[in-house]
Image: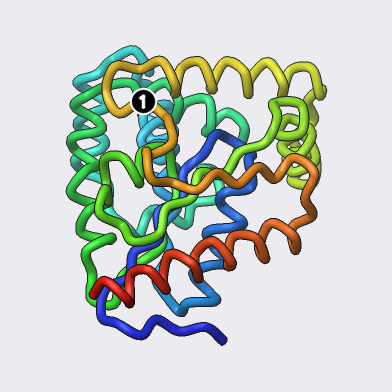
Amino acid sequence: MTETPNPHFVIAVDGPAASGKGTVAAGLARAYRLPYLDTGLLYRAVGVLMRRADQGLDDEAAATAQAQMLTADLLGDPGFRTRAAGEAASRVAVYPRVREALLEFQRTFAGQEGGAVLDGRDIGTVIAPDAPAKLYVTATPKVRAERRWKQLNAHGERVSRADVLKDIRRRDARDGGRDTAPMKPASDAVLLDTSEMTIEQAADAARRIVEAARARWITSS
């Protein structure tokens, strides 16, 4: 089992929807025995809670209020893992005040003693720009849509591949085109394209990237 040798080692994992970044990040957290946060759940939670309260997703004030009330104990809700939750997350994530409200939550998590692993869209660029290890995990839209389609069907959501691909492309455009913290690789992130990788191959490649980053970090510490 790999362990962290110094008191604060942060691993930032960014990338688009269904790229495999969540699986990669969770695996790294286990390997390095670090706490893990899927930051996309924060935005999913805001969107879902708004819908449950019959609030329109175009209401930035309501979205901001939901973000300000969000607590860690809510994030285990299975309702945040649905296709609809992902679409809602992408819509509320464009609001600067929502992102600002969730910023401290994420930075506090990243700043805890010993370090952490976080995945999302802007971890390496905004949340933890000084993270010693940064990965940008991606895959082609068709591959990501196939993965998400299989995941949704496994959870009982019946949807066509074509509709999932449309969702993926729409979310990519929205996440990459927003004015505040757009989705993009950090300048010092290592690109990991998982399009033709198995889960095991992606996990192995990610560990090698992090080991190289950790070696540089130890040397410079």
Estimate the x, y position of residue 16 in percent, counting from the top left.
Answer: 54, 34
The quarter of the picture where residue 92 lies is top left
In-image side of 143 versus 34 (left or right)? right
In-image side of 127 versus 25 (left or right)? left
Quadrant of the image for the N terminus?
bottom right
Residue 192 to residue 62: above or below: below
Estimate the x, y position of residue 89 in percent, counting from the top left.
Answer: 44, 30
Q: Residues within 10 Å of mark 1 (few under 14, many from 20)?
A: some
Q: Which residue is mark 1?
A: 182
Residue visible at 80% across and 30% down?
A: 158
In-image side of 133 versus 70 (left or right)? right
The amino acid marked with disc number 1 is Pro
Residue 201 to residue 112: above or below: above
Residue 194 to residue 63: above or below: below
Estimate the x, y position of residue 110 in percent, counting from the top left.
Answer: 28, 60
Residue visible at 23% across and 69% down?
A: 112
Quadrant of the image for the C terminus?
bottom left
Helix, strand or loop under label 1? loop
Most foreground residue, 81 or 211: 211
Total tally of numbered discs in the picture = 1
Residue 98 to residue 79: above or below: above
Most foreground residue, 129 or 110: 129
Residue visible at 36% across and 85% down?
A: 5
The quarter of the picture where residue 63 lies is top left
